[in-house]
Image (cartoon, grey):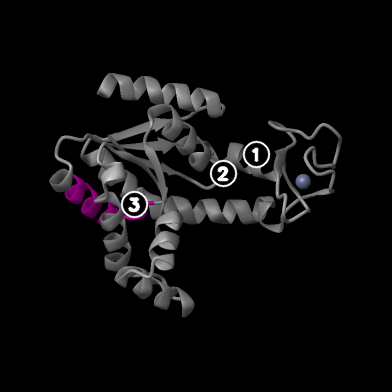
């Protein structure tokens, strides 16, 4: 089974994807990891991508898609994988779906959207505190994961700080951009009946809900 994780920044998409990956014994592939792997191995596509990135340019779709296809052709993901950060556009989603249908015809494909209301995301990120010790970098949340001692990191004892990009205005701006860009993508998955949308109250609920759904669809 190939699962595409969709959702705005702050929905817990990455964390939920990793939990599912362990529970279901499927590899968790993030676009960032695939890029880094291809670049450090200096593959043809990796070198191309690196060139664009060094110039501060967006890596074109065909290069990105080429790297994703190369990764998804490897044996360790023959039974499926959880994709985080790809596809980002309807064009990419279509290309991915066609590729998987041809390459892995016996595997099902599903897209999971974490549909968390913007206000909840804003509240969540606005309550986030990060350890000021860069080599620690632990993340806390005043609501869901408070430190034992106020303002102090449980792990290393350093001061906790609020990151600049976790303020409400920045988060709202990011969400507006996300919604603009994701509509077509969601429509694509709705159109081929592979979209499952969850609006979980917390991580555990999300994971349980998704696993129940996947059991039913297998
Ligand atoms: Zn720390």
Kindly identify the residue that appears in the image at 47 percent across and 52 percent down: 178
Which percent across, then down, holds residue 155?
Answer: 77, 40
Q: CA distance from mark 3 to mark 2?
A: 18 Å
Identify the magenta region: 86-100
In this view, the mark in front (1 or 3): 3
Q: Quadrant of the C terminus?
A: top left
The magenta stretch spans residue 87: yes
Q: Are the residues flagged by discs 2 and 1 in contact, CB closer than 8 Å?
A: yes
Instruction: Classify mark 1: helix, strand or loop.
Output: helix
Circle on res. 10: 2
Q: CA distance from mark 1 to mark 3?
A: 25 Å
Pick the residue in front: 177 or 156. Answer: 156
Q: Quadrant of residue 50?
A: bottom left
Which percent across, then down, holds residue 153?
Answer: 80, 42
In this figure, which residue is indicated by the disc labeled 3?
A: 87
Question: In screen coordinates, is 140 left or right of 27?
Answer: right
The magenta stretch spans residue 25: no
Q: Earlier in the sequence, mark 3 or mark 2?
A: 2
Question: In screen coordinates, is 16 left or right of 112?
Answer: right
Kindly identify the residue that appears in the image at 34 percent across and 22 percent down: 213
Mark 2 Cα within 10 Å, few/some/many (few <14, many 20+)? some
Which percent across, then down, holds residue 112?
Answer: 37, 36
Kindly identify the residue that appears in the image at 86 percent across and 34 percent down: 149
């Amino acid at each position: 089974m190939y699962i595409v994780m969709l959702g705005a920044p702050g929905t817990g998409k990455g964390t939920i994807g990793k939990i599912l990956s362990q529970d279901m014994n499927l590899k968790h592939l993030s676009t960032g990891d695939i890029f880094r792997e291809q670049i450090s191995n200096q593959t043809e596509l990796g070198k191309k991508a690196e060139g664009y990135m060094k110039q501060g340019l967006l890596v074109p779709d065909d290069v990105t898609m080429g790297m994703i296809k190369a990764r998804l052709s490897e044996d360790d993901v023959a039974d499926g994988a959880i994709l985080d950060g790809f596809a980002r556009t309807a064009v990419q989603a279509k290309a991915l779906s066609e590729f998987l249908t041809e390459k892995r015809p016996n595997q099902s494909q599903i897209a999971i959207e974490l549909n968390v209301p913007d206000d909840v995301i804003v509240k969540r990120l606005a309550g986030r505190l990060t350890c000021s010790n860069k080599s620690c970098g632990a993340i806390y949340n005043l609501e869901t994961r408070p430190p034992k001692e106020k303002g102090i990191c449980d792990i290393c004892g350093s001061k906790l700080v609020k990151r600049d990009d976790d303020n409400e205005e920045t988060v709202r701006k990011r969400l507006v951009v996300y919604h603009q860009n994701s509509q077509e993508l969601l429509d694509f998955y709705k159109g081929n009946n592979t979209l499952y949308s969850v609006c979980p109250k917390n991580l555990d609920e999300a994971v349980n809900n998704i696993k129940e759904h996947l059991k039913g669809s297998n």
